[in-house]
């Protein structure tokens, strides 16, 4: 690693399986026949994400000023399900059947709000929606650390799937591509390495499970093997030959991928492709950071319209090696 | 005080709103109040308490079209890019603010059908980038009514972090069935229209708009290549609330204090506030309490303008169009009327709500406040094009 490289410690990671709340798989029920269950699930979902975050918060943080903790959350679909539920209620029962509080869950901001409330956070925040929103959220959190606008970044992603698509013949992320594990969240605590403020977090390294770079945007047209190598080796100070795998989160709409072509021409790295445009990047980050020892990898999220966002992640041993 | 962030220049503006097309129409309406609500015709409002909204003129035939919001977004973006003299280039980020979550679910015999569910959250951001020839980072901010303020703040941070060389920030929102009926169900739509800070205020008027700002680092436009309308000198954000539906005084106060710290200014430097001013009883109460916390005894010397009396509540676009209203005040050195605010709530005799247009040749800094459901609050400190000596 070069002295100029700036990396961020990933303190912890967790996940929750939202659709199993209440012991039933919600998505196997038709919204028309199970409206009360759907309404309940909509209310439970932000709480489930908050519980997920609260577990990490309690375990890792002591006495930090909530105003210096940022919260950046991404979601592929946001609360589209609530809009659809409202539309369905209006079609079937009219305005009189519309529960006033359902609208409080209309914006994906509700998840950010509930997490903030439960953790008593008061720092900068953002709620992002769309393809690669998970990596954009990671970027937003690390950006605030980089600019010294926060001491700790909580970043994460959640998804609560498209209800109507589930009801109308199967939930798909794209043509022929099933959406895995609908309804889940991944939350990370991230701070600077080395820490920008002594004592901001507990001074133990046991719960540091890995490291990440600040994600960087590269346009499709500039997405060449040379550009990736320049970023990884030059800017991040990571020898490209030490990257063991590249995970590409494909855009559902993209037919051809210059990202994959570029990655395949990089020496040595194994390219693995995910067709799910949801929160799979952070899912990869969670799974691999926890299981990989001594390995480094890249995560690339494609977006429709030409573009991608890229991050480096490594297990703790990789950095120490 | 030392600023914690660097200012960015607003070099391009574009807007499509119930006031018309372009910044001149907007400024004219802000001065004269030349908008009015009209009956919503593009979806069934049967059973709703309120059936009127502020609609963009000449748009009735396009209402309800699946791609209408994208079209509005593109119109405002093209104005802003043209105004800035910018051609599509690398390194320009596209940050879209919207809360739009709408479509029309069809129902067949015993199943629901996706029908059309365009939303802005998925393909529209990519579609907009493609149509505008932008290949920089792009994403959608969806933080309720604070989305616009957040998008401007994020764009400024991205420029300050060196991630992009410029940003096109755009808020876009149409009056759509789900949001309109949801607001009606929450009973915050007003039958009488929005009256910010007025004694008889009863809620908001649903509205729609697309508004775009082109942002660049100040030092890159000092060569005279581009004119500067204004500078975004400070940004503050807070997510603090004990309620999912109510504004929070402490959260608003904190966002304003952070924006002032970020700008390296004190409350004494602020000449006027373009308030969020929804015209709801609780929302305006919380905002006035926050302004009192920030400005203290000086509150009576700070002019307050509420734009929603004329524009209505443009939801995800509100933060950007109200930032533009703040910019136009600085450009024209006039404070427009806070329409329909007269008489002001008698509990606030010291509040200087602008009830008649004022010349303001000496104004230097304005504050634009946005608040969203769920307790997210933003504040932007906006300065005149030329930095004070």
Image (tube, coloured by chain):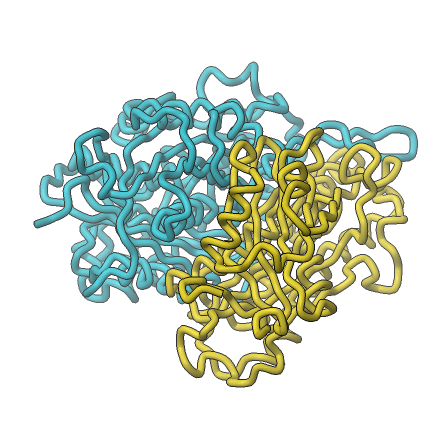
Identified at 41% across, 47% down, the residue is B163
**In this image, B106 relative to B332: left or right?**
right
Q: Residue A291: x percent and y percent? A: 74, 69
Above or below residue B286? Residue B370 is above
Residue B74 makes an appearance in the image: yes
Residue B282 makes an appearance in the image: no
Q: Residue A99: x percent and y percent? A: 70, 49
Q: Nearer the viewer, residue B159 or B321?
A: B159
Seen as rendered, the residue at the extreme right is: B110
Q: Residue A304: x percent and y percent? A: 62, 34
Q: Residue B61: x percent and y percent? A: 56, 14
**In this image, B362 relative to A18: left or right?**
left
**In this image, B157 relative to A314: left or right?**
left
Identified at 25% across, 30% down, the residue is B31
Colour of the chain lettered B:
cyan
Identified at 22% across, 35% down, the residue is B228
Q: Nearer the viewer, residue B166 or B116?
A: B166
Q: Quadrant of residue B33?
A: top left
Query: Which image quadrant: the N terminus of chain B?
Result: bottom left
**In this image, B246 relative to B324: left or right?**
right
Q: Nearer the viewer, residue B61 or A70?
A: A70
Q: Which chain is yellow?
A: A
């Amino acid at each position: 690693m070069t002295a100029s490289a700036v990396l961020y410690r990933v303190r912890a990671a967790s996940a929750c399986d939202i659709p199993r709340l209440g012991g039933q798989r919600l998505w196997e029920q038709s919204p028309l026949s199970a409206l009360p269950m759907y309404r309940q699930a909509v209310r439970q979902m932000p709480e489930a994400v908050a519980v997920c975050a609260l577990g990490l918060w309690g375990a890792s943080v002591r006495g930090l000023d909530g105003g210096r903790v940022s919260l950046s959350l991404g979601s592929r679909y946001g609360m589209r399900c609530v809009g659809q539920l409202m539309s369905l209620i209006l079609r079937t029962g009219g305005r009189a059947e519309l529960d006033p509080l359902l609208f409080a869950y209309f914006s994906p901001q509700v998840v950010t709000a509930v997490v903030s409330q439960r953790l008593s956070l008061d720092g900068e925040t953002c709620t992002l929606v769309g393809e690669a929103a998970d990596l954009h959220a990671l970027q937003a959190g690390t950006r605030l650390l980089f600019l010294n606008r926060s001491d700790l970044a909580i970043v994460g992603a959640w998804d609560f799937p498209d209800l109507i698509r589930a009801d109308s013949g199967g939930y798909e992320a794209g043509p022929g591509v099933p959406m895995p594990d609908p309804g889940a969240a991944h939350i990370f605590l991230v701070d600077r390495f080395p820490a920008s403020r002594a004592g901001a977090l507990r001074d133990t390294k046991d719960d540091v499970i890995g490291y990440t770079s600040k994600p960087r945007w590269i346009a499709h047209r500039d997405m060449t093997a040379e550009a990736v190598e320049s970023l990884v080796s030059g800017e991040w100070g990571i020898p490209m030959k030490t990257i063991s795998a590249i995970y590409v989160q494909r855009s559902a709409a993209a037919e051809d991928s210059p990202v994959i072509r570029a990655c395949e021409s990089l020496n040595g790295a194994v390219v693995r492709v995910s067709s799910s445009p949801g929160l799979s990047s952070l899912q990869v980050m969670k799974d691999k950071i926890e299981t990989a020892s001594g390995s480094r990898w890249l995560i690339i999220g494609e977006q429709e319209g030409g573009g991608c966002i890229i991050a480096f992640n490594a297990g703790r041993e990789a950095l120490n090696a | 005080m030392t600023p914690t962030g660097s200012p960015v220049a607003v070099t391009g503006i574009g807007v499509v709103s119930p006031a018309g097309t372009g910044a001149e129409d907007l400024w004219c309406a802000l001065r004269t109040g030349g908008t009015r609500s009209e009956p919503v015709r593009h979806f069934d409002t049967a059973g709703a308490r309120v059936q009127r909204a502020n609609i963009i003129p000449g748009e009735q035939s396009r209402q309800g079209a699946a791609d209408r919001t994208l079209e509005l977004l593109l119109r405002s973006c093209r104005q802003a890019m043209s105004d800035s003299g910018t051609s599509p280039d690398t390194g320009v980020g596209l940050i879209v603010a919207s809360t739009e979550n709408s479509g029309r679910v069809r129902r067949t015999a015993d199943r629901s059908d996706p029908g059309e569910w365009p939303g802005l959250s998925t393909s529209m951001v990519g579609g907009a980038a493609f149509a505008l020839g932008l290949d920089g980072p792009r994403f959608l901010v969806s933080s309720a009514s604070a989305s616009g303020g957040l998008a401007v703040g994020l764009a400024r941070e991205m420029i300050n972090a060196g991630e992009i060389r410029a940003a096109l920030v755009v808020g876009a929102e149409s009056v759509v069935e789900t949001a309109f009926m949801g607001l009606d169900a929450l009973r915050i739509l007003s039958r009488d229209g929005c009256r910010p800070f007025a004694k008889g205020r009863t809620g908001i008027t649903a509205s729609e708009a697309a508004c775009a700002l082109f942002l660049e680092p100040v030092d890159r436009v000092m060569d005279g290549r581009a004119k500067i309308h204004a500078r975004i000198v400070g940004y503050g954000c807070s997510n603090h609330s004990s309620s999912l539906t109510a504004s929070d005084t402490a959260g608003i106060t904190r966002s304003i204090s952070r924006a002032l710290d970020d700008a390296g200014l004190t409350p004494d430097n602020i000449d006027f506030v373009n308030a969020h001013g929804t015209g709801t009883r609780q929302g305006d109460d919380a905002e006035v309490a926050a302004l009192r916390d920030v400005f203290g005894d000086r509150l009576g010397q700070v002019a307050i303008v509420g734009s929603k009396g004329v524009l209505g509540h443009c939801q995800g676009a509100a933060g950007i169009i109200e930032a533009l209203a703040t910019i136009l005040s600085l450009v024209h050195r006039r404070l427009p009327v806070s329409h329909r605010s007269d008489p002001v709530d008698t509990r606030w005799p010291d509040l200087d709500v602008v009830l008649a247009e004022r010349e303001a040749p000496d104004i230097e800094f304005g504050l634009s406040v946005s608040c969203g459901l769920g307790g997210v609050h933003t504040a932007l400190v906006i300065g005149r094009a030329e930095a004070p000596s």
